[in-house]
Image: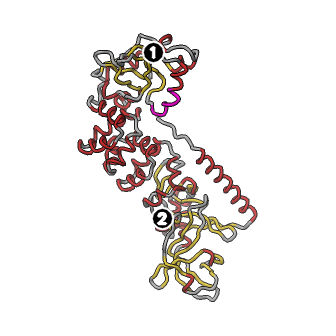
Amino acid sequence: MREVLKKPSQLFQRMLYIKNLEVLSMKMTTNPQVFLFLSELLGKKVIDLEKREWGKVFDLVVSLSEPYPPVIALLCRHKKEILRLSWKKIIKIEAYFLTHSLTPADFDTLQLKEGELLLKDFLLDKQIVDTHGAKVLRVNDLHFLQVDHTLRLVHVDVGFKGLMRRVGWGKFAEKFFQWFFDYQLKDSFIPWRYVQPISSPDLLRLKISQNKLAQLHPADLADIIEELDVYKRSQVFQSLDAATAAETLEETDPKIQVRLIETLNPAQASDIIEEMSPSEAADLLGDLPKEKAEGILREMEEEIAEDVKELLVHPDEKAGGLMTTSFAALPAETSVQEALKFLRQEAENLDVIYYVYIIDAEGHLLGVISLRELLTAEPETNLSNLSNPRVITVGLEEEKEEIADLFAKYGFKAIPVVDEEKRLKGVIPFKNLLEVVAPKLGK
């Protein structure tokens, strides 16, 4: 499985997050702070200094531009209308929201800007991704910290205790569980920094939110996508960049792979499939309807498409169907220094990097060199002087059982595949075989 490396920009964002956390912590130690829940705030009256009632709180608006999103406005239900009131008008929260003196001109119609989020509408009772635990959960309540004049979202409550609080049975449930089970109900909070909302495509496209998914290992992201319903699954997948989507797709169940690709047009699908290893791409295209697969192949770069087409003609469980065409093959006269330079430049695009195969001008397999041998050899040495001519190979029609026996006997990480004239056609990485012999282990 491929590792997801954090980019410098992501590391900088992490450092900035820690700095903001330290600043907020300093404020918390020097100013009075109060913790509140969204369930406690919804429905509270909005009353100004003249004791005039302006409706009840219907929802809160936060800005996602900060690590702890501050509430920037509240929505009031006033005379059958939903109107927006700036948080700057709020003086304090008691049994009601006390505001400065208000006039109708202080209220705006509801219009969200980019980076703003309606909490009740987009989070409460909705699914979110816990990117720390790599799982999908449902939101039962939201936890705020009030410090100075700000109200900041700090946790998402996904526990049973939060649900009981929502329906007004919080204290009763706590007493009942303590009395009947001798068990104290505990809060189940997820820090906001680990939360990825997925209730709408717009939330997934927000850069600040999307980064949370991009930092997950592809295997974890695949597990999350498989947990979601068809609609949400598509939204999350389509929010990923092509490289991340390709890595995730390789870790996803084949049936779900097909469903995800079928939601994309050929141009979008080709961008993702070009990022996959040739063998994985061929497996996926082979499972698609013929017309859809051909449309995607027409959109792909010609060289990549030809590699994939070559793999598509072979049955999945024979050597030709298990092999990849993404490996290192160099002429015998290549020097060690040149070979290492080639590997540095192409490593990201190779499915097999621990062996370099030596071929002649017609593509006949002459020998093999391990990466360890390359690293310990003198830079000026030609590969012909290091090459081991006794190469264990399999034919294009070799069955998976025979291939598995060779892997077990010799302990190779990969086995080359040759045609009847001993021309090198591909290489079978052990992982590809494992996905056929033991699918759960291979993935």
Residue appearing at x 32%, y 24% in the figure: 319
For the record, the magenta segment spans 342-349
26 displayed left or right of 123: right
Q: Tell me the amino acid under the disc marked 2.
A: Leu
Give the residue at mark 2. 124
Which of the two residues, 238 or 294, is positioned nearer the viewer here? 294
| Residue 343 belongs to the span the image colors magenta | yes
Determine whether 242 is above or below 68 in the image: above
Question: SS class of the residue under badge 2?
Answer: loop
Residue 55 belongs to the span the image colors magenta: no
Residue 311 coordinates in the image, percent (x, y): 31, 30
Quadrant in which the C terminus appears: top left
Tell me if residue 190 can be seen: yes
Q: Residue 338 versus residue 10: which sits nearer the camera?
A: 338
**Residue 223 in picture, x, y percent from top left:** 43, 45
| Direction from residue 54 to residue 32 in the image, left or right | right
Mark 2, Cα crowd under 10 Å, few <14 / some 14-19 / many 20+, is: some
In this view, the residue in front, 173 or 20, is 20
Query: What label does residue 332 carry, if any?
Result: 1
Q: Is residue 183 above or below residue 98?
A: above
Side of 91 where 371 appears, left or right: left
- Location of residue 187 by image quarter: bottom right
Q: Principal SS element in the magenta part?
A: helix
Mark 1 or mark 2, whichever is nearer to me: 1
Find the distance from the CA under tag 1 to the CA under tag 2: 64 Å
* Among the two numbered marks 1 and 2 on one chain, the one whose residue lies closer to the N terminus: 2
Numbered circle sitting on residue 423 = none
Q: Tag count in the figure?
A: 2
x then y, percent, for residue 343 = 50, 27
